[in-house]
Every structure is written in C-alpha cells, then in structure tokens.
Image (cartoon, helix red, strand yellow):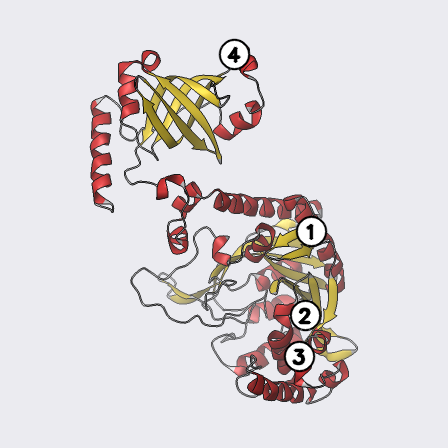
Amino acid sequence: MEFEPRDQFAQRRKKLEQIQELGHDAYPREFRWTDGIDTLVRTYGGATAAELEANKRETRVAGRIVSYRLMGKAGFAHLQGGGQRIQIYVRKDVVGEAGFALFHLLDLGDSIGVQGHLFRTKTNELSIWVDRITFLSKALLPLPEKWHGLTDVELRYRQRYLDLLANEESRRVFVTRARIIQELRRIFDARGYIEVETPMMHPIAGGAAARPFTTHHNTLDIDLYLRIAPELYLKRLTVGGFDRVYEINRNFRNEGISTQHNPEFTMLEFYEAYSNYRDLMDFNEQLFAQLATSITGSALVKYGEAQLDFGKFERLSMREAVTKFWPGDAGPGPTTQDLAAPGGARAAAERYNAWAKRAGAPYAAGKGTLTDGEWTGLLFETIAEEKLIQPTILYDFPTDISPLSKQKPEDSSLTERFEIYIAGMEIANGFSELNDPFEQERRFLAQMAQGGDEVPKQLDVDYIRALSHGMPPTAGEGIGIDRLTMLLTDSHSIRDVILFPLLRPQGLETKPDETPSTGKSE
C-alpha cells in the first residue's frame, strides 16, 4: 500500500511505528470523552481568565490536530471537532517524558484525546492545559494545503472527506442540508402526515418519464428497475387509507449530469387525500416561507446576485409564461387564446424558431411529431423557464405532457398540475391526482405507444387494479431536496450539496452530458 506523496507516507508510517514502540496501540478502540470541542467553545467562549481559574473546569476531549508548534519543553496545538477549534497547551513536566515523546511524534491531521482543564493564555485564547495525551489515529497522508483549504473542485467531490476537513463552508452546507430535512419532517409530522418507505427496486419502471437503471434479481430471475419515482406506491397507500403520507426518498434516473442534475437524487414526495392542486399551491407558499425563515433567519435569501423572496410567490399559467417572456425581437407574441387554439402552439413555435435561426437563439427543438400540448411545454422550456428567478408557481399544464394528472373540468386540454420555479430551476411538481382507472389505463397505453427510452414498456396492471378499488380525490407533490438545499445555501452546482456525487472514474474519457428529464413524475 503506497500513496502519493510517498516520502511523507513513509515518514509518517515510521512515526506510527515509533508511537507503537512507546507502548501505544496504533489503532485504539475507544476514547471516553466528556465534552465536544464545539460545546466547550460555545459554552466557555465568553468566560474570563479569572472565572476559568476559579472553577478549574476539567475536560476530556478528542479532535484532529490542525496546527502544531513546539517550543523546547512545551508546545501548542489546535484540535478541531464539531466544526470548531480549541488550543491545547502541553508541558513536558506535566505530561511526563513518555507523554511529551508522543507529542513530538504527532503530525498535522493526527487524532488525539486530551485530559486537562480550561484556562486562558496570555494572549487570552481559550485553551486546555493538558495533563494527559491519548493517541487515537495517525494521518499517514498529509491533509490538503496545510489547512488553508482544498481548492481543486474535482478533488473536493472525489475526496469529500478532505473537503469537509479543509473547507468550513462545505461543512456548513451539509449541516444545513440535514437541518432542512429535519425541518421538513417536523412540518409534515405536525400536519398529521405519516412517513413511510416504499421499494427502491420496481418490477415496472413507472411514475415518471425518465430512463431507468436496470438490475437483475438472481433468485427470482427477473429484471428490476431502480425507482425513478415512488409515486405509484405512495398512491397505493392512499387507496389503503393513509390519507396523508410522505417519503423522503432516493430516486435514480439513468440520464445526464449537469449543475442541476445528478443520476441519484433525493426528493420529498407527499400525498394528501380530499385535496386538490390549488390546496397544495396555497400550502407551498406557507411551506417555503416557513422553511426559509427557519433555516436562514429570513424569507429573503441571497442566491448569487439575486435576493429571493420566499414570502412572495407569483402565479402564472404555462401559456401565460410563454406570452410573458416571448422575445420582443421575435415579432408579436401569441396570446393565451392563440396557444389554446388547435395548431396555435405549433404555429408559435415555428415563428419562434424562424427568428431563433436568424438571431442565434436557442431552438424549441422537438423530436418527431408533437402535439399542441407538447409544443406548449417545449416553448415554455425554451423561452421562459430560466427567467423564473423569483419564486413562481407555474400551473395548468397541457394534458399531453401530464399523464398522471387530473384534467381541468372546463378544459380537457389542460390538467390540474403545477410546478414551482426558483432561480430558473424547477423545485417542485404537484397536481390533482388522476384517480379514474379507465382514463389512467388509456393514458398509460398512449404513453407506451409513443415508444422511447423514457416511457414505461408495460402496463402497471396492479396500479390500475388499486385505482379500481377507489382512490379518494388526492393532491400529490414532489420537492427536490438537492435543489432546495442549493437555494438555501447559495450553492450553484448540485454536486456541492450531494456528499458523494456520481463522477466518471478517473482516467476515462469524458463525454458530453445528455439532457436529463426533470420533475416529480412527468
């Protein structure tokens, strides 16, 4: 076993052997600590030297050495733990010959435990006067840039453990992510929801339009699919009488990688019986404002150059968004009535694309023969999506691109579906769930007839059977945890908020990203 830099690896390995010769276990099994470093700093950071001297607060703490200096028969070091640092002071006449010999053999990155009492140095720094040192672990490899930070972005993703040690900002992001999930659980539990777990391996790839990962179960001799969404199982639970149910779930989509997409991602998905999509739109405005305030202290959140107001949502229908953001140079834009008329969306797309060709703007490029609803969705993605910076609820999606949503009673070309966009990203997707088993079967079959890698290959008969037992009127939604964390931590790549993002193995030639699908289920 040899790693670069080899010289330091060899030197530190030799020191580990010397530590063993002093009688220490190279890899101890435990250390009984009484305090965390972060707790000591938080509790005694304001205590004066006189107060510490009077109380002689004894402590046993463990941490990683992040600074180290010897001065004859004494030395100082800083230990890090829980995102905080504390100084230790070691004297030969206090810890003894053997203890000071151990101190001499330590390196930056080593883990030790110390026993002693709190005091303040002449420079007024909170410190531990060490009575005893316990060796815990040798860092055989040096830590990045002597604790000045790990700046190689790819290395930060590949060796996240170093990133967390060297970059306090990375640690803050992932602590915040944990707080976001805790707060979401608190909010939904308070509303009477039940948290559940549904299968990650599905016999039929369903619940979303996305290319699945395929695996094989040897004993059953069947192919299975890593789930692209838990939707169809959660709605089975609604049929079974769980009126309010949620799952914080991992989904897998065998698609491209970008600053907003990772093939493995986390979502909160929930279903509420006896509600519709407008109920969820109202709830989301409360949810996002409450979450932002709880996590950041304010409904106003900085994201890049923008200040996002989570306390104020704009509402636009998809057709309204297309008309609102139609490029002025592309000539008169279509009205919502134009887009609703037969052939109107296609005609608008043809006019837009003719202008885009002249102007060098992005195309509304579709594959094969598209329906009016599909053209509307494509126009929205091309013209409007990235311009939705402030929190926006986009609603009334075409039926053609919403196979699991209930149609609007007054207009069968539209469904009771909405998405939430913030900073140009889709954050959530929800709708009034389709609970008519006959209509659901028809839409599934129409979806399958389209073919392609992103549609189901077989009919989910059991789901149709479940609907046939009667599902009450239900509203459902999925919220992307990764993108939500990006917004609330001012992170601009999804890889910055996923502890171990998927990366191509080192040494393999990179390939262009594929265009991933988005959303809860469509």
Image coordinates for residue 157, horizontal then vertical, percent: 41, 53
**What's under tag 2, amino acid-wise?**
Leu
**What's under tag 1, amino acid-wise?**
Leu
Among the two numbered marks 3 and 4 on one chain, the one whose residue lies closer to the N terminus? 4
Image quadrant in which you'd find residue 398: bottom right
What label does residue 434 carry, if any? 2
Binning the other alpha carbons within 10 Å of mark 4 as few (below 14), some (14 to 19) or many (20 upward) gives few
Left or right of residue 80, residue 387 in this image:
right
What label does residue 300 carry, if any? 1
What SS does tag 2 mark?
A: loop
Binning the other alpha carbons within 10 Å of mark 3 as few (below 14), some (14 to 19) or many (20 upward) gives some
Give the Cα separation between the discs numbered 1 and 4: 44 Å
Among the two numbered marks 3 and 1 on one chain, the one whose residue lies closer to the N terminus? 1
Give the Cα separation between the discs numbered 1 and 2: 36 Å
Whether residue 354 is visible: yes
Q: Are marks 1 and 4 in contact (CB under 8 Å)?
A: no
